[in-house]
Amino acid sequence: MNQETKKCQNCKKDFVIETDDFTFYEKMGVQPPVSCPDCRFKIRA
């Protein structure tokens, strides 16, 4: 899979998911994120 640019469902900013990230998500059996790293951090904090 190639690098993909997505739009955050929370703040509407564009963020990039790298090829290596897709490999990690597939290995862990989870879907790629729909929120940018900043919003994911805020949710966890």
Image: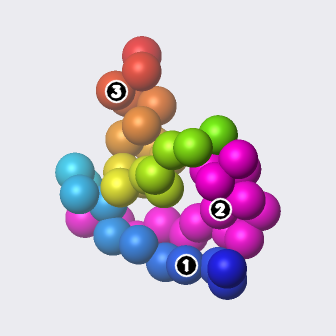
CA gap between label 2 and label 3 equals: 21 Å
Q: Earlier in the sequence, mark 2 or mark 3?
A: 2
Q: Earlier in the sequence, mark 3 or mark 1?
A: 1
Is 5 placed left or right of 22 in the picture?
Answer: left
Q: Do tag 2 and tag 1 residues touch (Cβ < 8 Å)?
A: yes
CA gap between label 2 and label 1 equals: 9 Å
Measuring 48% from the left and 66% from the top, which residue is drawn there? 15
Q: Residue 14: which numbered mark, if any?
A: none
- The residue at the far right in this view is 20
Give neighbour class at mark 2: few <14, some 14-19, many 20+ (Cα, 10 Å): some
Query: Is residue 15 in the magenta section?
Result: yes
Residue type at the position of mark 3: Ile
Give neighbour class at mark 3: few <14, some 14-19, many 20+ (Cα, 10 Å): few
Measuring 65% from the left and 62% from the top, which residue is drawn there? 22
What residue did someone put label 3 on? Answer: 43
Q: Position of residue 43 (x, y in %)?
A: 34, 26
Q: Secondary structure at mark 3?
A: helix
In the rendered image of this protein, does residue 32 appear above or below residue 15?
Answer: above
Q: Residue 4: which numbered mark, if any?
A: 1
Magenta span of residues: 12-27
Q: Position of residue 8 (x, y in %)?
A: 32, 60
Q: Do tag 2 and tag 3 residues touch (Cβ < 8 Å)?
A: no
- The residue at the far bottom in this view is 2
Q: Position of residue 41 (x, y in %)?
A: 46, 31
Residue type at the position of mark 1: Glu
Query: Is residue 43 in the magenta section?
Result: no
Is 8 placed left or right of 5 in the picture?
Answer: left
Query: In the image, which is nearer the foreground, mark 3 or mark 1?
Result: 1
Measuring 67% from the left and 83% from the top, which residue is drawn there? 2
What residue did someone put label 2 on? Answer: 22
